Image (spheres, rainbow, N blue to C red):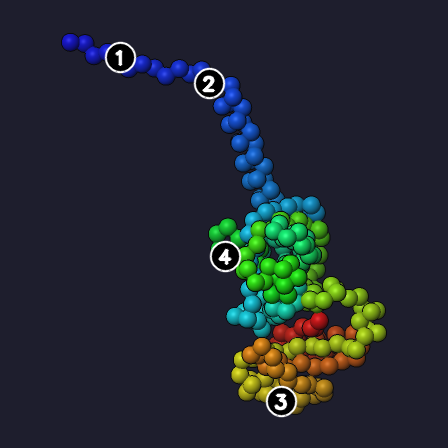
């Protein structure tokens, strides 16, 4: 008895299905191109996804840029964007948006595209919920020569040098410690070895910070250079 041959499927494609497939393919290609573009971004490059924030666990530690992480300032971590890039972050859930400089690497969790400082998360009103749907857009490419600090003060954005000189002065943070003994030891070293005055220890949010006060920007820059030469990673606070 002969076996019947299986019927061959028709190669004729449904026109509607073919059109839908073409649209989906174009969308996927566009998405891939946008993601790849973030490695060498131009102004206007965008990306959508989830934003998270990171706080006290990393406060006082060095970021990928070399700047000491201050969770209360405006900054963010991104896996690909060059350090120093500025992005406009829009909270898709409430419409709030904020310019944020990139000074660190992360987040290393699937599905998340940016990790914000606590200061930035508060301004975008996503601090309480932890995660938010966001759209980020590159508004300024990273400078060829990186200057610290990259992060910005939490209130009023980045102040110009002229405006800062007319204000109360500058505070340089030389270190942050969970134990006060560490802060005391550093403050003593700054006074004795580097002959610095106006050194103080401030305490808040479970951390002891060693800070130096200066009235003028040039004086603050001089202190920063002396600290750098001594191997101490310091930065101007907001």
Task: Identify the residue under disc 4.
Answer: 108
N-terminal of the pair, mark 3 or mark 2, is 2
> Can you tell which of label 3 and label 1 is closer to the viewer?
1
Residues under labels 3 and 2: Cα distance? 80 Å
Q: What residue sits 67% from the left and 81% below the top?
A: 211
N-terminal of the pair, mark 4 or mark 2, is 2
Q: Is residue 163 above or below residue 17?
A: below
Give the label on residue 5, or none: 1
> Can you tell which of label 3 and label 2 is closer to the viewer?
2
The image quarter in which residue 105 lies: bottom right
For this view, does 9 lie left or right of residue 97?
A: left
- Residue 117 seen in this snapshot: no
N-terminal of the pair, mark 3 or mark 1, is 1
N-terminal of the pair, mark 1 or mark 4, is 1
- Most foreground residue, 154 or 83: 154
User: How packed is label 3: few (under 14 Cα within 10 Å), some, or many (20 or more)?
Assistant: some
The image quarter in which residue 155 lies: bottom right
Could you tell me which quadrant the C terminus lies in? Answer: bottom right
Task: Identify the residue under disc 2.
Answer: 13
- Most foreground residue, 11 or 17: 17
**Label 2–label 1 contact, CB within 8 A:** no
Residues under labels 4 and 3: Cα distance? 38 Å
Task: Identify the residue under disc 3.
Answer: 188
- Image position, residue 213 (x, y; %): 73, 81
| Residue farthest toward the left in the current orientation of the protein | 1
- Most foreground residue, 196 or 111: 111
- Residue 152 seen in this snapshot: yes
Q: Is residue 13 above or below residue 163?
A: above
Residues under labels 1 and 4: Cα distance? 54 Å
């Amino acid at each position: 008895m002969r076996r019947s041959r299986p019927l061959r499927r028709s190669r004729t494609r449904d026109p509607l299905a073919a059109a839908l497939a073409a649209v989906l393919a174009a969308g996927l290609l566009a998405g891939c191109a946008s993601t790849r573009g973030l490695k060498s971004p131009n102004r206007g490059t965008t990306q959508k996804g989830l934003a998270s924030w990171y706080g006290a666990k990393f406060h006082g530690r060095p970021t990928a840029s070399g700047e000491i992480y201050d969770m209360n300032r405006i900054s963010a971590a991104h896996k690909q964007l060059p350090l120093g890039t500025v992005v406009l972050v829009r909270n898709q859930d409430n419409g709030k948006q904020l310019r944020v400089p990139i000074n660190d690497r992360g987040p290393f969790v699937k599905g998340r595209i940016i990790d914000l400082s606590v200061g930035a998360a508060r301004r975008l009103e996503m601090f309480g919920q932890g995660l938010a749907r966001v759209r980020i857009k590159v508004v300024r490419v990273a400078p060829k020569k990186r200057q610290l600090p990259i992060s910005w003060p939490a209130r009023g954005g980045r102040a110009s040098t002229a405006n800062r000189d007319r204000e109360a002065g500058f505070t340089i943070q030389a270190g942050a410690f969970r134990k006060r003994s560490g802060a005391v030891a550093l403050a003593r070293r700054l006074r004795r070895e580097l002959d610095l005055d106006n050194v103080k220890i401030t305490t808040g949010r479970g951390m002891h910070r060693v800070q130096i006060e200066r009235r003028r920007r040039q004086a603050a820059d001089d202190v920063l250079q002396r600290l750098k030469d001594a191997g101490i990673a310091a930065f101007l606070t907001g």
